[in-house]
Amino acid sequence: MKKLLTGNEAVARGAWEAGVHFAAAYPGTPSTEILENLSTYEEVVAEWAPNEKVALESAIGASLAGGRAIASMKHVGLNVAADPLFTFAYTGVNGGTVIVSADDPGMFSSQDEQDNRNYAKAAKMPMLEPANSQEALDMSKLAFEISEQFDAPVLLRMTTRVCHSKSIVESGERAEIPLKPYSRKINKYVAVPAVAKVLRVQLEDKLSALREYAETTPLNFAEYHDKSIGVVCSGVCYHYAKEVFGENASYLKLGFTYPLPPRKIAAFCRSVDKLYVIEENDPYLEEFIRTLGFDVFGKDIFPAYDEQTPEVIRQAVYGKMLPQLDYERSKVTPRPPALCAGCPHRGFFYEIGRRKNVMITGDIGCYTLGSGAPFYGLDSTICMGASISMGHGAAKMLARANSDIKVVSVLGDSTFFHSGMTSLLGSAYNGGACVNVILDNRTTGMTGHQDNPGTGYTATGEPVTVINIADVAASFGIRHIRTIDPNNLSEVRQTLDEFLALDEPSVIITRWPCALKKFSAEDKEEFGAIFIDKHTVDADKCIGCRLCMKAGCPALSFDTAQKKAQIDAAACLGCGVCAQLCNKDAIVKAQEV
Amino acid sequence: METKSVLLVGVGGQGTILASKLLTIGLMQAGYDVKMSEIHGMSQRGGSVSSQVRYGRVVESPVVEKGGADILVSFELMEALRWLEYLKPTGRVIVNDFRIAPMPVINGDMPYPDDILQTLQQVADVSYIDAAAIARQIGSDRVMNIVLMGTIIKSMDLDSIDWESIIRENVKPAFVDLNLQAIAAGMAAV
């Protein structure tokens, strides 16, 4: 049956058709929907893992026990999972195993632009790169066969455009693959040095066989038209290049990109006059082709960063883009993303942003938006879980310098479970003295509300034990732990005052649900009638001082003609933060007017 | 046929995704090759969003390039100007009479210019419609996006597609009539 699927939906469908038994992931744009879709198939055990390392290790265990397994993650997630990845390439699989890396060229929703094709080469594992949703489905399915045929885990490298573009897909049905029998194989799965040395040699044999496969697989194909221009490409760049060159060029489209096929590539390069290599982001194909002795146009003319969209190719090759209208572009006001109306992070960032003499180490989540106007409430964002550990190291150095700067570390609930827990353990163990703030919005917000160990539900909606953040912190020996309402500014202020004066580590948990979350029965019971008391501005009392604008709320605006604040009734959720900023009691609950 | 490019732009939460989803289903059922591209994640949080729909005999790139859109449908006034560079010089603009202040305007750091429509009209073929008011007349603000989808159907000569069955298959039964009226009203508005 033909349907329009995103690349992520197609990967999930392909894995399901391949009979996958086990799927695990940690949410991360642009990979999240793979596991979300897999969790809808009842034949698949689908789980949100607390982090990518746990996801991959669970998948490895499922493979060893005889199941077909898939672990999906965003590109930086594979850094977290890199430890098991490299050794898993040595041991190989029992049930076929696929690891999906969703890279983000252009950094639409990421802190870096790393090219994870380098992981396939570094870890020595076969890699497939789809260009569209049909290929995503077909390659996801085939990857399990390749994995079992060559006894190797397979890396499926996606990019944002392949993940989130829709195209027409012909889907099939599920093949029910029985679990493979399990037996203890010490010489395969116990990677002590004596075993690993043998596996390492065997890995070279596997790679030789995979290299031959790359020479013959139809996943790597030449498409000959005009031979004056030849384009070597992988992933969505194939479609971008065809958009620009059409039949005025020939193409070598590489879908199986580790190990690369030297003979197939050399034959293509010899058959064309002028050679372009078009790829996102690193010169991965280009460097290989240069080792074969061919000169190419690559990163010398194409940007080393960002997407290689048709306009980028056109500009690089022809020095011009398509004709465009000429108009006054300076009138366009930027529209940066902002904390939503009703966001429970607002109250905390208002208070922390006003403090002097604090260093605020941040983390990965919606709350990175607290770094911007009007809060300017962050000093750093590096990676998942880094807030607490970076804060710990910074505090040690600030103390040595006799600085009066205090450190506050800020991260979300899901990020705490991901890797903030071990950071907190390190700080507690090593005599840290930071204030660690966990912004517990009862969900994984930025990626679109996935459950996590703190929500009480699994990926498939099963109710489970809620892991309590305060209990976790207490088990690390932390003595000062307080759970507060972030919409109550005086409570936030007083708790910060009190905990910043301490000489030992402390934990503040700001507990209030994300305004966009679908509330569970437990949320409704705990938080009561939330988000119903919309606020409004009493124009008679408003003096136009703009103090409320410091809330940075999209529901609030300032009427410059009338010199009055106003609240968009449709957008306001009644969190009340702005009302607490007003000195004139001009912001009131709408029902009280 | 030459590949056609439709660019739907707006602000996160305005319903561009549903409108473009229904559009792509119709185009696929009419026998076109179709690709659509969206960006999820951080940019959704009150930021500028776009749904890019391309259809034809064979569609290569899922993204519309600058100077490549046959039609730009903007759910918000300023966004039309932001994305105007993506329009073909011969292309058509449909702008919704709807303003959402971006954060620099809310903070009072920058004005929301009052001559955006004039700037658009000076250089492009612009239809300015009040889709929210049209939607309200039909019965619900929430079908503003479907009204705008109707304007695309009319402008791109896609009215031979059986939109009624597509709406019936993809919208909850209680909202089918409302959505069909919204398409018709959108078609009548341009």
Image (cartoon, coloured by chain):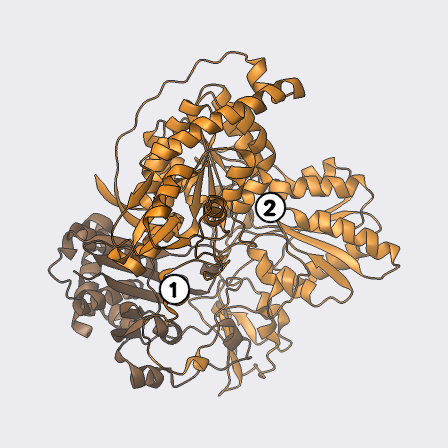
Furthest residue in direction bottom, as rendered: A561
Residue A292 shows in the view:
yes
Q: CA distance from mark 1 to mark 2?
A: 43 Å
Q: Amino acid at mark 1?
A: Val
Chain identifier of the orange chain: A
Residue B100 sits above or below residue A428 on the image: below
The amino acid sitting under disc 2 is: Thr
Quarter of the view holding residue A262: top left
> For the point 38% across and 54% down, which residue is it?
A275
The residue at the point 77 percent across, 50 percent down is A393
For residue A326, the mark is none
Instruction: Tell me if residue B34 comes above or below residue B117 in the rendering.
Output: above
The chain letter for the residue carrying disc 2 is A
Q: Which numbered disc, 1 or 2, marks the residue that appears first in the sequence?
A: 1
Image location (x, y in percent) of residue A50: 57, 38
In this figure, which residue is indicated by the disc labeled 2?
A415
- Look at mark 1 in the image and give the residue it sits on: A317
Q: Colour of chain B?
A: brown
Q: Position of residue B31 (x, y in %)?
A: 15, 51
For the residue pair A21 and B183, the one nearer the viewer reads as A21
Please name whichever residue, B58 or A430, is drawn nearer the observer in this view of the structure: B58
